[in-house]
Amino acid sequence: MTRKIFCAIFLVSLAVLLAGLLIAAGCTYRYFGRVQGEQLRSEWRLAAAGIEESGMDYLTRLEDDGVRLTWIAADGTVRYDSEVEASQMENHADREEFGEALASGTGSSTRYSRTLTEQTVYYAARLSDGTVLRVSVSRETVFGIMAGAAPLLCVAACLAAALSWLLSARLARRIVMPLNRIDWDAPLENDIYEELSPLLVRIYRQHQQIKSQMFQLQKKQEEFTHITEHMKEGLILLDGNGCVLSMNPAAAAIFDVREDPVGKSFLTIERSSDMSEAAVAARSTGHTQIRRERHGRIWQFDFSRIEQGQEAAGLVVLAFDISEQERAERSRREFTANVSHELKTPLTSIIGSADLLDNNLVKPEDVPRFVGHIRKEATRLLNLIEDIIRLSQLDEGEQLAYETVDLAQIALEATEQLQDAAVQHRVALRLETIPCPLHSVARLLHEIVYNLTENAIKYNVPDGKVVITVSREEDEVCLQVMDTGIGIPAEYQDRVFERFYRVDKSHSKASGGTGLGLSIVKHAAQRLGARITLQSVPGRGTTVTVCFPR
């Protein structure tokens, strides 16, 4: 900007200087032309007076003073000329100033030399005898004067240009200096040229508008960042070239990204061919999805195309953790298979015994044994069906009736119901309780105590014992069932609460268990908001603790 202002001022200064010189030269030239014209008229009057008085004698006595005198007869014949012999001069009847003098009494004209650097000014007037006296003088033209003064003009022009250069540079700096000190963050607080006030007001308004827009954009960006950072799902935004625009922490954890991935190609982050193929398919079809295992979890990756007009502007990649769904689906399949197997086993036994009885293939003395076997398997089948129905009810989230109950009293009732089973298995039951009122569901509490105690009896050793303890903590009421049974190996302890899971299948079959007791305990505890802990040592026994919130 300083350069432009400097050049403008410098060129204007030179133009004004040259125009001033030309105007001054022209005015001076015209002024001296008028002075010279007056001098010519004065010379003519003097010469005319002398001729009128003395005639040719006066002219012959004149000295050369730079003015040329020419006396012309009425027919144009030259009678006298102060520079050339009259006889050698041509007739002047066709001269402009001569014709005007004859016609109007006076005449004048100007004629230039061939080089245009000199001109001759003529003034003529008619004398009383009808002749014409002409005076003339030669002078240089403007071009001649300028040509003669060219060296001096060049020096003056150089000095003027140098002065203009310095003044222009200084003036340009003085003009630009206040502009450089403008505080653009606060345009209205600047004390500067009044002519810039409308511009500064407009800049201020635009500044406020930009600040408002930036605030809104930042707010939206913070909201987007806040949402994506707290998403459990992975989110990746890709541009049209497959480069990462945004990646939330969940996605960074899934793909093991530790550095800022923005601007990098997605292929440098995930090099698997199936991911690349899914991205290519999404760009062409609009959407695709794949499932892959990462860090022990099952993830579903959804690729969706972002369209802008008729073109694909990028991709959105969403990663969903479907591990629980996969486990639930696997558990459902396993549950269906186990139910089919568990139902088939007693039914097969019942049908086989019934067929033998129906075909009279059983000795009369063995009939009571076969009937007892049928009754036993039917009871087992009924218990299995009841447990399955109970689990289904817990899964469906049936409405629960809460009331104030005493966990110690419920434990006492369950222990009394299992006393015969304990005697049959030669297991001693011991109850250690204090009154512990709870706002809970009595039926679910009974199922928890009953199933844990029954399990402890079935998987105990002869002459073993089971201790049921009910205690009260600060915020919890805890039920603990401890046995001296066979115990559970450490590698199986995480799975004993799964449906139909048995550590020792041969022992389970002998005990008549359905494999659903601990699953019912787990689901009932979840419905009541309780937590379960299990401690077991093979050969020494198992302790299960269930703590209920007070």
Image: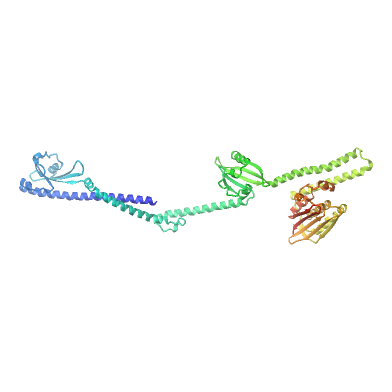
Residue 316 position within the rendered picture, expressed as x and y whole percent measured from the top left: 60, 44
Q: Nearer the viewer, residue 304 or 439?
A: 304
As drawn, the residue found furthest toward the front would be 539
Q: Nearer the viewer, residue 178 or 269?
A: 269
Quadrant in which the C terminus appears = bottom right
Left or right relative to 403: residue 204: left
Left or right relative to 162: residue 462: right
Residue 462 position within the rendered picture, expressed as x and y whole percent measured from the top left: 86, 53
Tally of numbered discs: 0
Left or right relative to 75: residue 143: right
Colouring method of the image: rainbow
Q: Nearer the viewer, residue 161 or 198?
A: 161
Q: Residue at x 83, y 51 (%)?
A: 458
Left or right relative to 172: residue 501: right
Residue 435 position within the rendered picture, expressed as x and y whole percent measured from the top left: 80, 61
As drawn, the residue found furthest toward the right would be 365
Residue 8 position within the rendered picture, expressed as x and y whole percent measured from the top left: 35, 50
Does residue 443 appear anywhere in the picture?
no
Does residue 143 appear anywhere in the picture?
yes
Q: Residue at x 43, y 56 (%)?
A: 182
